[in-house]
Image (cartoon, grey):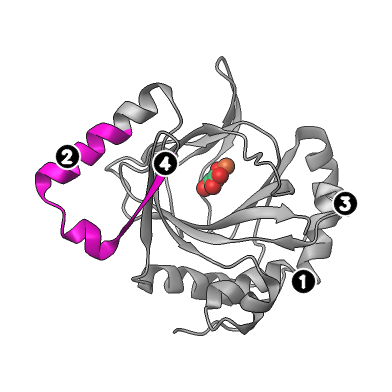
Amino acid sequence: MTGLPVLSLNPAIDATALAARYAADGRVQIHELLAPAGAQALYELLRSRDDWVQVVNSGEKLFELTRAARAAMTAEQRAQLDTAVYAGARSGFQLRYETIRVPDDATTRLASPDPLATLANWLSSDPVITLLRTVTGTTEIDFADAQATAFAPGDLLTGHDDAVAGKRRHAAYVLGLTPQWRAEWGGLLLFHDDHEVHGGYVPEFNTLNLFRVPMRHSVTEVTRAAAHRRYSVTGWLRSR
Ligand SMILES: O=C(O)CCC(=O)C(=O)O
Ligand SMILES: [Fe+2]
């Protein structure tokens, strides 16, 4: 598995200013989180992985499709899946994207050779965890859970607020790892209710989006104009 260079936090980040913004809005962006070599290596890692699993729900049920399973699908089966996804997105909760999961358990994660586990450990230790506690004003944060995600054309995640009983999530984060993106390609992280869009973020390379749980948001469908997939590492800042 490709290794990562030593990950380091950008020393120029102004935690006080970010904390003021988060306190006011419940969300903030931290630009250039990592020293550039680390961010670039993470992007190359995500591009090179072949263990992506597509997750897609049908109502309350979650299904997982490996790359091999999708390659074996007929055109008709693909069309049926698309129809089901768009029917689900019409009025209910719907998701479809690819993921590579990282274990939550600290011991398992420390022993893992997966560079994504290394990133999750880095986010969960100093100096990063202290920065995230300061920005969110939440001293109870113990660790960051993590998964890599990739949204291809047709992938989406409809409105939800991330609150799950027992998970002890204080804030959500999304570390953007797509080098270049246009708002017109979709894949926008929007904060909204049924009437108004309060704001949103265009995917940006090496930018960490941080927002309070619960807060309603969605990821708009990635269009066919997207030149590549929308890569991120995402998760929640949690108490044990
Ligand atoms: O990828 C994003 O921008 C947000 C992901 C998200 O909302 C989630 O995984 O719950
Ligand atoms: Fe979410």
Amino acid marked by disc 3? Thr
Q: Which residue is mark 2?
A: 79
Residue 59 as seen in the image, left or right of residue 137? left
Residue at 47% of width from left, 68% of height from top? Answer: 43
In this rendered view, identify the residue nearer to me: 99 or 217: 99
Residue 176 x, y percent position in the rendering:
54, 56
Comes first in the chain, label 4 or label 1: 4
Residue 30 x, y percent position in the rendering:
69, 53
Residue 201 x, y percent position in the rendering:
56, 41
Q: Which residue is mark 3?
A: 16
The residues tagged by marks 1 and 3 sit, at their Cα atoms, a distance apart of 19 Å
In this rendered view, identify the residue nearer to me: 218 or 94: 94
- Give the secondary structure at mark 2: helix
Amino acid marked by disc 2? Ala
Comes first in the chain, label 3 or label 4: 3
Mark 4, other Cα within 10 Å: few <14 / some 14–19 / many ≥20: few
Residue at 46% of width from left, 31% of height from top? Answer: 93
Mark 1, other Cα within 10 Å: few <14 / some 14–19 / many ≥20: some
Q: Which residue is mark 1?
A: 125
- Which range of residues does the magenta coloring cover? 61-85
Confirm whether the magenta stretch covers residue 81.
Answer: yes
The residues tagged by marks 2 and 1 sit, at their Cα atoms, a distance apart of 44 Å
